[in-house]
Amino acid sequence: MSILVTGGAGYIGSHMVHELADAGTHVVVLDNLSTGFDWAVAKSVPLIVGDTGDQILVDQIIQDHKVDCIIHFAASIVVPDSVRDPLGYYRNNTVNSRALIESAIKHDVRQFIFSSTAAVYGDPAQVPITEDAPAAPVSPYGWSKLMTEIMLRGAGMAHDLRYVILRYFNVAGADPRCRTGQSTKNATHLIKVAVEVALGLRAKLDIYGVDYPTPDGTCIRDYIHVTDLVRAHSDALRYLRGGGASLTLMVTVSRCVR
């Protein structure tokens, strides 16, 4: 049996694949390489280039590799882009996820881990946020992820599909062994942008907002290290493998960056 990691050539997904491969787990990656890189995938792991919405391809992967669990990372993730192209985000993040879930059910895949986002909470009334805070996205990106969560819950109840949904904030850092990292071209992640400015690869670092309730009026954002996030997904996998019931969880923040 093996695990299908969608988006496994991307930033977080490639770290997940290395974690699984290091543990001796059989893994297969599906990625369209729109933002990922083939070199980021662990050398021992097969990479299949394609879309999660291609059900014929996904069906074949599940059958050929005897997939019994799916870890779903593949998604478009830039919030401003989702505002400019909402239908593109709903297609890639929601419609393709629906197709993936359907293929999982069709082939008796009973374990599903969904990499969601804290963007489903929108602008929360209280912080820190807990899992039971009301979902109220303020962007098509957040809505596209929440809709996938809703579909997964419905499918789980109707078809005995057990899942873990993980919601988290901003991700930073890289593999301690330097095998992969945040390599996305024109990435909007603050830490990558700051490093590129320091290296002279960008002319400046733009800071937005001067009216936050902080000493200097600038925003404080929560970050989690990518290896910590991957461990959370690994914990979710062990939980499901052990017979755990479906859960929706907030991944705790490792550290804050001003």
Image (cartoon, rainbow, N blue to C red):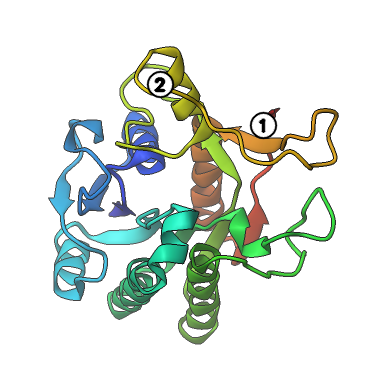
**Which element is circle 1 on?**
loop
Query: To which quarter of the image does residue 108 belong?
Result: bottom left
- x, y (%) of residue 255? 68, 29
Q: Check the picture and name the quadrant holding the C terminus.
A: top right
Mark 2: give few (<14), some (14-19) or many (20+) Cα within 10 Å: some
Q: Which mark is nearer the camera, 2 or 1? A: 2
Question: Does dot 2 land on a helix, a strand or a loop?
Answer: helix
Can residue 42 be seen here? no
Decide which of tag 2 and tag 1 comes sooner along the chain: 2
Outermost residue on the top side: it is: 199
Give the residue number, with chain letter if any, for mark 2.
Answer: 196
129 vs 210, nearest the viewer: 210
Give the vertical position of 156 relative to 11 (above or below). Answer: below
Near-viewer residue (161 or 8): 8
Task: Classify residue 221 by image quadrant.
Answer: top right
Q: Is 137 on the left or on the right of 99, as rendered?
A: right
In the displayed structure, would residue 173 be above or below residue 55? above
In the image: residue 187, left or right of residue 60: right
Q: Residue at x 40, y 55 (%)?
A: 71
Where is residue 222? Give x, y as percent: 67, 38
Q: Amino acid at mark 2?
A: Glu
- What amino acid type is highlighted by mark number 1? Ser
Instruction: Tell me the tag on residue 206.
Output: none
Q: CA distance from mark 2 to mark 1?
A: 23 Å
To which residue does mark 1 refer?
Answer: 254
Q: Position of residue 27 (x, y in %)?
A: 27, 46
Visible in this render: residue 74? yes
| Number of other residues with Cα within 10 Å of mark 1, as a class: few under 14, some 14 to 19, many 20 or more | few
Residue 36 appears at what percent x and percent y? 26, 42
Q: Quadrant of residue 178?
A: top left
Residue at 72% x, 59% y is: 123
